[in-house]
Structures are given as C-alpha cells and as structure tokens.
C-alpha cells in the first residue's frame, strides 16, 4: 500500500501535524484542568511532556488506538471525555483526508484512462490517415485511368472527325480538280489548232476560218476563267482546312467567333446532306480571347449533330446558327428541327461515354468534350430539346473585361 | 493481497452493485448484527439524497489464537453510473467482493451493466477477476416483482460464484452473504498466509471470529 492510498491506515501525526496539535493541546489541557500530553500509537509524545506515571486514554480511529491522551493529574472521567472529544476531531479529519485522497485517486485514474484513450485515439487517427492516403492514391490512379481513356476517346473522335472532314474535302476538291483538268485538256487541243495554223498560213483567212479559231479564242478564255474559279474554290477549301488544322495550337488569340462559325458552316455544308438547310444569322461580335481551333471543332460538331438530327427525323428540316453580342458576353445558338432528345437522353448527354450512336460514327466530338472546351473558355453550354420537335444548344462566352 | 505486518492482517472487502441496490443497507445491517471482538462505527462519508458519493466503511476485527489481529474493512462503492472514477478507486486493492444485485425485474439491465463494469474495473485496477473471492447477492427479495429465485438460480447455475438471496432492509440473508464471502476469502488465503499452520485458525474459527459467533464445540 502506498502513502497516497485513500484507504491506508492514517497515523495521528499525519492527520494532525505539530502546529495543529499545538493549537488543540493547550485549550484541551485548560478544559481538563490538568497536565496533558498527546502520544502516537507507539507511546511517543507528539505534544506535551507525559509524566512517567500518567494515565492513558486511547484514541480509536477504527478498531485500534491511533494514539493516546496522557495525564497524571486529570480525573479519569474527565480524561475519557477529553479523549472522546479528541477522537471526534480525529475522525472528522480522517474522513476529510480519506475523501480528498480518494478524490485525487479517482481523478488520477481518470487522467490515466484519458491518457490511454488519447494514445489509442492517436493510433487510430494514424491508421485512418494512412487509409485515407491510400484511398486518395487509388482515387488519383482511377482518375488518371479515366482521363487517359477519355483522352483516347477524344483522340479517336478527333481522328474520326478529321477523317470525315478529309473525305468531304476530297470530294469538294475533286470536283473543281475534274473540270480544271478537263478544261486544260481542251485547252491543249486548242493549242494544237494554232500549231496547225502555222502549216496553213499560206491559205490565209480561209485557214483561220476552217480551224474555227474565233471560237477557240473565245472558249479558251472561258476555260481559263473556269480554271481560275476552280482553283480559287480549292484555295478556299484549303484555307478552311488550315483553320481546322490549328486544333492543337495553344490558346489564346483574340478571334471573331463569327469567323469560326463561318468556317464551321462552310466545312459542314460541303457536302450538304439532302433535306437539310443551313441558315445563319450572325450579328457583329466583339473579339474573344479564345482558342479558335478548339471552338471551330465545337461549332462544327454541334452543327453536324444538328444536321444528323434532322436526317434522323426522316423529314426535311433546317439547322440555324445565330450569334449575338450580349451585355456581358457572347451568345451562340444552334437550333435544329430534328428528332430531339428525351429527358433521359438530355440528362446523360454530357456524360463522357454517352452517345446514342456508335462511338466514332461520324458525329464529330462528343458533347462532353464540347462542354469541356466551352468550360475551358469559362463559358456555359445548355441543352433544350423536345422529342420530335428539335434541339437548341445555347452557348455563352463571358466577355473578357 | 491483504495487508500484513508482524501483528496484524487486513482484508479489504468491497460491496459493489448498481445504484440503490442496497449496498449501504447491507453494511448498516452487518454493523447491527455482528459482534466480533472489535467493531468500529460505520463511517458514512458523504451522501446526497441517501446515495453514496464516496464510500461507506465498516471496520471489524478479532484476534487469532496466535495473537494475530485480523482486521476486515468493508467498503461500499457509489452505485450511480456517474461515479465510475470513484468506484474504481474504492475497488482498488480489494481482497474480496460482494455484488449486490437488485431483484426488481426492472433492474435486470442495470444489474448486468454493473456486473460487467465490475469485471472491467477489476481488470483496470489490476485485480484478478477470475480468482478474486466473489459472492453474488440478490437483494430486495421482499419486492412483489422480484425475479423468482428458481429463475435466478437457473441463470447463475453455471457461474463459479456463490449466489445468496437477501432482504437487506430486514437484515435477512445479509450475514449469510457475508459468511459465504468469508469462506471464499479464507480458502483463497489459507495457504499463502499460513492461516491454519502459523495462526491455528480453521475456516470455521475464522468465520466465527469475524461474525462474533461462539464456535460450536467439535
Ligand atoms: N424493498 C427493499 N428495499 C431495500 C432493500 N434494501 C435496501 N432497500 C432500499 O433501497 C434504497 C437504496 O438502498 P442503499 O443501501 O442506500 O443502496 P446503495 O446500493 O447503497 O445505493 P448507492 O449508494 O446509491 O449506490 C433505500 O431506500 C433502501 O431502504 C430491500 O431488501 N428491500
Ligand atoms: Mg450506498
């Protein structure tokens, strides 16, 4: 048992120190009207000088004497009363000391328990931290995988749309190319006629007439004009192509979105699918700091989506493109009168892997990629669709202050 | 381990149990009933509305034929849930336990929780709960909705501890409970303390000494 245990055996000298005994002793002796000494349980004097022949009266705390009152002159009944009084004081003190010692023990134990719990908490916190770090790493890995997949999908879509673009362009270029080369063939025949004229110069005017050189000169000029026209068309197509080849050029450049829309319309309409009309209403716009290559792709794919929707509806219809300057930015609306989308389709339309058609089946970028590009321009994209009636995609780009 | 010096031996015994199960009443009745050679006052520390805040203490003692003074200090713990810290401190260094359960049918959960807390606290303060002398008392047998004795016996049949029934209010069963604890206590320490050999103290003499009964001549 340690000296701090509440339930130890308390000694008289411990309960009442010398100073306290010096305060209790004198008045007690005075009341007793005799000599008095206070002894511990072994008979050692704690206060006063006991006479050798003094009578002792026990001070019992629990079962045994914790000490004694000793007096030679006091009458026994008086000494017993003094001992009873002293015992009462002693017990009151013992109760108080036990209660405070117990309280201290309880508090210390609670503190120990708290410390133990605290260390357990720390340990479990460390475990959780480790777990959450692992989770974070796993989430990061998953996100990286997803991003890689999406990038691949984006690349696949880009390739597909570039392929489609190339096919359209080839068709468009082939046409003028065909008549330019046929014109040049005719022109060579015309030159042959001039070579023949050289041999028949002697015939004079008759040779000129028989070779029909008036017609050759007239038609030759026409053929050359046609060729120049055809080459100009090819030049335009190549210029359009060039602006689409800027896709991977980093931003930003101050561009007119109307020019982007015109490029997109011109690419989308060559060739224009049957039954589809394209209408534009482009109003003057402020320049916008943007990546025109990326926006070209967005507009092209939205216009193509619209054309596809019209074709899917099985009846003739139109896709209209409208641009407008708003007080705080630029609004662009691409509206089609096609099949429209059900609410469920609209809800999922922006999901990265969602499409109502086979992936890469020639509709250009997915809506999710389009949205990502718009978001990268701090813009907004909103779908509004009625099944059977058509779809409007609204884009908003905040103006650069 | 009991406190021991050349001339005396002290056992600390603790009455544990849920709030208001009758621990203090057990001590008060023992003080009335027993008449050992040495008997102190019941020290009731501090109560609030009759509920123990710190502990109660009843000291008892007698001399063995060898002259050894055997002292027993009976403590009660405060039963209220809030005083668990105090309960643990009082429980510390105990040599034997009485678990005072309330027979009232509605108190079954409280009994169970208190018993579990006793086992837990024993471990926390370093007592060997599996081997410490322990008696289970079902008190308040006088209550009309007391769980029937047969049911309790059946439930506690497999447990290693003696079960006693009491009505502490009238004193019934209080001494029998204490006697069962004394016997378990004696058996646990007879060899380690040389009770029979060094102090010529038989189990019956030990019990008779504490209770203050005269030993029946053999
Ligand atoms: N009916 C009945 N009531 C009892 C019995 N024993 C005790 N009581 C009553 O139960 C109440 C609580 O008794 P205590 O002895 O103070 O209970 P305790 O276990 O010390 O309570 P705490 O100190 O709060 O833990 C008192 O009103 C007692 O009179 C009994 O055998 N029968
Ligand atoms: Mg009590």
Image (tube, rainbow, N blue to C red):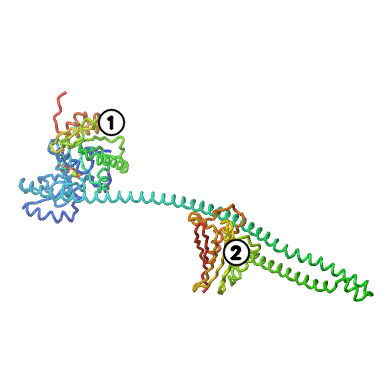
Under circle 1, the secondary element is loop
Q: Position of residue A8 (x, y in %)?
A: 23, 45
Does residue A139 appear anywhere in the picture?
A: yes
Ligand 2 position by quadrant: top left
User: Is residue A216 found left or right of A135 in the rendered image?
Assistant: right
User: Is residue A69 found left or right of A250 in the rendered image?
Assistant: left
Q: Which mark is residue B191?
A: 1
Is residue A307 placed above or below B9 in the rendered structure?
below
Residue projecting furthest to the right:
A202
Is residue A239 placed above or below B155 in the rendered structure?
below
Residue projecting furthest to the bottom:
A205
- Give me the chain letter of mark 1: B
User: Is residue A294 found left or right of B176 in the rendered image?
Assistant: right
Spatial separation of the CA atoms under disc 1 and disc 2: 111 Å
Is residue A215 placed above or below B111 in the rendered structure?
below
Q: Position of residue B95 (x, y in %)?
A: 26, 38
Q: Quadrant of the N terminus of chain B?
A: top left
Q: Which mark is residue B45?
A: none
Question: Residue A369 versus residue A37: which sits nearer the camera?
Answer: A369
Question: Residue A24 versus residue B218: which sits nearer the camera?
Answer: B218
Q: Which mark is residue A277?
A: 2
Under circle 2, the secondary element is strand
């Amino acid at each position: 048992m340690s000296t701090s245990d509440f339930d130890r055996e308390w000694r008289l000298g411990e309960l009442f120190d010398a100073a306290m005994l010096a305060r209790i002793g004198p008045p007690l002796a005075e009341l007793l009207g005799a000599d008095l000494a206070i002894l511990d349980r072994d008979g050692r004097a704690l206060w006063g000088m006991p006479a050798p022949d003094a009578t002792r009266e026990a001070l019992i705390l629990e079962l045994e004497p914790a000490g004694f009152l000793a007096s030679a002159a006091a009458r026994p009944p008086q000494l017993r009363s003094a001992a009873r009084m002293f015992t009462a004081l002693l017990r009151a003190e013992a109760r108080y000391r036990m209660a405070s010692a117990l309280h201290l023990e309880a508090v210390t134990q609670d503190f120990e328990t708290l410390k133990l719990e605290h260390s357990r908490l720390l340990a479990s916190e460390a475990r959780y931290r480790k777990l959450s770090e692992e989770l974070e790493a796993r989430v990061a890995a998953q996100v990286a995988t997803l991003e890689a997949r999406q990038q691949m999908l984006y690349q696949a879509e880009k390739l597909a749309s570039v392929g489609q673009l190339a096919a359209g362009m080839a068709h468009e270029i082939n046409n003028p190319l065909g008549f330019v080369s046929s014109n040049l063939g005719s022109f060579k025949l015309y030159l042959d006629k001039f070579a023949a004229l050289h041999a028949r110069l002697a015939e004079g005017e008759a040779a000129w007439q028989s070779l029909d050189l008036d017609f050759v000169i007239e038609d030759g000029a026409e053929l050359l004009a046609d060729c120049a026209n055809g080459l100009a068309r090819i030049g335009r197509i190549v210029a359009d192509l060039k602006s689409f080849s800027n896709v991977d050029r980093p931003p930003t450049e101050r561009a007119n979105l109307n020019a982007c829309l015109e490029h997109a319309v011109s690419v989308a309409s060559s060739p224009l699918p049957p039954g589809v009309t394209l209408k534009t209403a482009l109003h003057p716009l402020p320049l916008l700091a943007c990546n025109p290559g990326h926006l070209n792709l967005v507009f092209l794919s939205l216009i193509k989506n619209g054309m596809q929707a019209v074709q899917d509806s099985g009846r003739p219809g139109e896709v209209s493109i409208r641009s407008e300057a708003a007080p705080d930015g630029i609004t662009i609306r691409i509206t089609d009168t096609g099949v429209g989308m059900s609410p469920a389709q609209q809800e999922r339309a922006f999901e990265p892997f969602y499409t109502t058609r086979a992936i890469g089946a020639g509709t250009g970028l997915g809506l999710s990629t389009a949205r990502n590009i718009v978001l990268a321009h701090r813009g907004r994209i909103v779908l509004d669709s009625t099944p059977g009636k058509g779809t409007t995609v609204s884009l908003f780009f905040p103006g650069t202050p | 381990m009991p406190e021991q010096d050349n001339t005396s031996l002290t056992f600390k015994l603790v009455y544990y149990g849920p709030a208001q199960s009758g621990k203090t009443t057990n001590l008060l009745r023992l003080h009335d009933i027993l008449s050992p050679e040495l008997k102190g006052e019941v020290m009731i520390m501090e109560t609030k509305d009759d509920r123990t805040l710190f502990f109660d203490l009843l000291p008892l003692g007698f001399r063995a034929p060898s002259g050894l003074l055997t002292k027993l200090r009976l403590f009660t713990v405060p039963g209220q849930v809030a005083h668990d810290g105090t309960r643990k401190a009082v429980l510390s260094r105990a040599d034997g336990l009485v678990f005072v359960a309330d027979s009232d049918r509605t108190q079954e959960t409280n009994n169970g929780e208190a018993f579990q807390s006793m086992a837990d606290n024993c471990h926390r303060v370093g007592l060997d709960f599996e081997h410490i002398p322990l008696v289970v008392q079902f008190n308040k047998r006088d209550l009309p909705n007391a769980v029937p004795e047969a049911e309790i016996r059946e439930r506690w049949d497999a447990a290693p501890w003696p079960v006693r029934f009491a009505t502490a209010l009238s004193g019934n069963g209080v001494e029998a409970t204490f006697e069962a604890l004394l016997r378990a206590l004696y058996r646990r320490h007879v060899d380690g303390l040389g009770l029979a050999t060094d102090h010529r103290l038989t189990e019956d003499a030990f019990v008779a000494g504490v209770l203050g009964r005269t030993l029946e001549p053999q």
